[in-house]
Structure formats: structure tokens, C-alpha cells
Image (tube, rainbow, N blue to C red):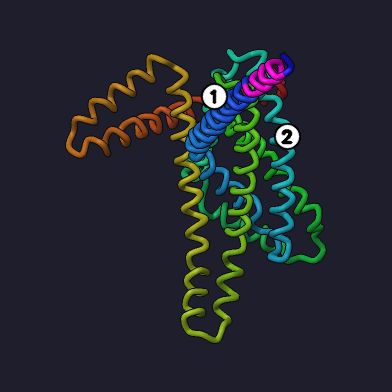
Amino acid sequence: MAAGSLLALLDDIATVLDDVALMTKVAAKKSAAMADDVSVMTKVAAQKTAGVLGDDLALNAQQVTGVRADREIPVVWAVAKGSLVNKAILVPAALLISAFAPWAVTPLLMVGGAFLCYEGFEKLAHKFLHSPHQDEAAHESHAKANANPAVDLVAFEKDKIKGAVRTDFILSAEIIAITLGTVAGAPFVQQVTVLVGIALVMTLGVYGFVAGIVKLDDLGLWLSQKPGAAARALGAGIVRAAPWLMKALSVAGTAAMFLVGGGILVHGVPAVHHAVEGMGAVAAQWPVGGLWAVLVPNLLNAVIGIVAGGLVLAVVNLVARLRKGGTAH
């Protein structure tokens, strides 16, 4: 009798262990599936926000130009810390919106998209409406102030940092909003994981790259002073290429504003989105269809972004004039 009870107990224990093993396997599979989902969503979010990064890189690299060479990295580090603070504010705000007002995600995305288009159009307007002599005079004045020992360089750096952190807040908000739109339907834990991951990776990537860009000329100068002919030639090439890299980043950043901003606006209006998709499907039938299927929707997004940016700039200028007229009276 005792032997039978012992066998029954052992059988029960074996059954429990089988159940535990089965549940462990199920939990492991669910964890692996969740990890795969997080990885996929992070990749999708990174792809969607990549367009904003060109603008982020160019703007932040430009923001820290003009700082003394020995202060460039400390200034970049200060802006990077400000960027982390921005994201520490934006990520919880995005999660709260997703939890309590998910309907607000698309309108916020469209506001952000419209702002990107406006900023891009403003850059184009500044380039074509301002005389090159004005920009040259501003650069000369800045260089003289930077070389003048009487100028408070600490205050100058603080202004640079504040301006860069403000710019970062706007672009970070756009990145977080795009990411939120990607993970809006996912479980809360996955939303947190993807948003935090994107925030950290983007910050480290952007400001690491910015630090490299602003020190390119120093690297070129260092190499040009080396005894080897190859090192000197490489250094001279880097010094010559650095300004062109900044210009290329600026152009890429402006294009990214229209592509990303226009794409967000297009996706926010279903009728326009379907029309653009339909044109892309038609373009896919042309020779080299795969290429046209990608180019045509992106070109249409850019055109819509340019038009939207022009309209927003016109409204902003009109409001500014009305306010000036009101204060004058």
C-alpha cells in the first residue's frame, strides 16, 4: 500500500515536472516571439525615422560650428546630454498619449510632418531670398567675435547649446512620434522597449557622428603634418572634403524634411495615400518598374511636402504681419 502511494506520488511529481517543462517551453517561445516582434518593430521604426536623421545630423553639426576647436567635443557632449533629457520627457509623454489618447497619434504626426515641411521650405526661402553677401558678413562677424578675447565665449557656447537642444527637441519629438505610430498597436511592454531603444540608439548615433564630423578638419590637419606622403595627401583630402560633406548633409537634410514630412501628411489623408500608392503601382509597369515604383511615390511625397511647407510658411508670415500691425496700432 505504501509502495503504491509512493509510486502515485512519484507519478504526480513527474506530471508536475512535465507541466513545468511545457510551460517553460511555451514561455520561452513567447519570449522569443516577443523579442522578435520588438526587433522587427525597432527595425521598422528605425527605417521610418532614418529620413529625419539626415536633417538631425546636418542641423546639429551646423549648430556647433564656430566653437573653438578645443571646445567642440565638450559642446557636442552638452547637447547630447540635453538630447537625452528631451527624450526622457518625450518617451513618457508618447506612452501616455498612446495609453489614454491613441486617436491623437495621427494628428500629432501630421503636425510634426507639417512643421518639417515648413522648416525645409524656410531653408529654401532663406537660400534663394537672402544675398550671399549677408551670409558672408555674418560669418566674418562671427569669426571676429570668436577670436576676440573680450567676447564671453562661455555665454556664446551656452547660446549654441540652448539653440541645439531646442532644435533637437523638435526633431526628437518627430522621431518619437513616428516610432509611436509604428508601435501604437503593440503591447505596452513592447512599446516601452522600442521607444527607449530608438531614443538611445538615435542619440548615441547622431551625436557620435556629429562629434566625428566636427573633428574631421582636425583629423585632416593632423594627418597633413605627418612625415609620410600618403598620410599628408589623405589629410589634405579630408580638409578639402570636410566643407563639402557639411554642404551635402545640409542638402540631404532639407530633402529629408520634404520626403519625411510629405510622407507623413500623405499617410494621414487616406484618399491622398491611396492616390499616391496607385500612381506607384502604375509606375511599376514602366521599364525598370521596380525603380520607378520607389521613385514616383517618394517624388510625390516630396512635392506634397514642398507645397505644404510653402503654405505653412505663408500662414506663419501672414500671422506675424498681422501681429505686427496689431501692436503698431
The quadrant holding residue 90 is top right
| Of the pair 86 and 309, the residue shown nearer to us | 86
Disc 2 target residue: 88
**Amino acid at dot 1:** Gly
- Give the percent coordinates (x, y) of residue 99: 66, 16
Specify start and end residues of the magenta stretch as a single range. 3-14
**Amino acid at dot 2:** Ala
Identify the disc placed on residue 230.
none
| Of the pair 263 and 240, the residue shown nearer to us | 263
- The verdict on residue 226 being magenta is no
Disc 1 target residue: 181
Residue at 63% over, 19% down: 98
Rate crowding at label 2 as few (under 14), some (14 to 19) or many (20 or more) other CA atoms within 10 Å. few
Residue at 41% over, 15% down: 270
> What is the secondary structure assignment of the residue under circle 1?
helix
Say whether residue 118 is visible.
no
Residue 286 versus residue 326 in the image, above or below? below
By secondary structure, the bulk of the magenta-drawn segment is best described as helix
Judge left or right: residue 160 versus residue 134. Answer: right
Q: Residue furthest left?
A: 287
The quadrant holding residue 23 is top right
Q: Residue furthest front?
A: 1
| Of the pair 53 and 32, the residue shown nearer to us | 32
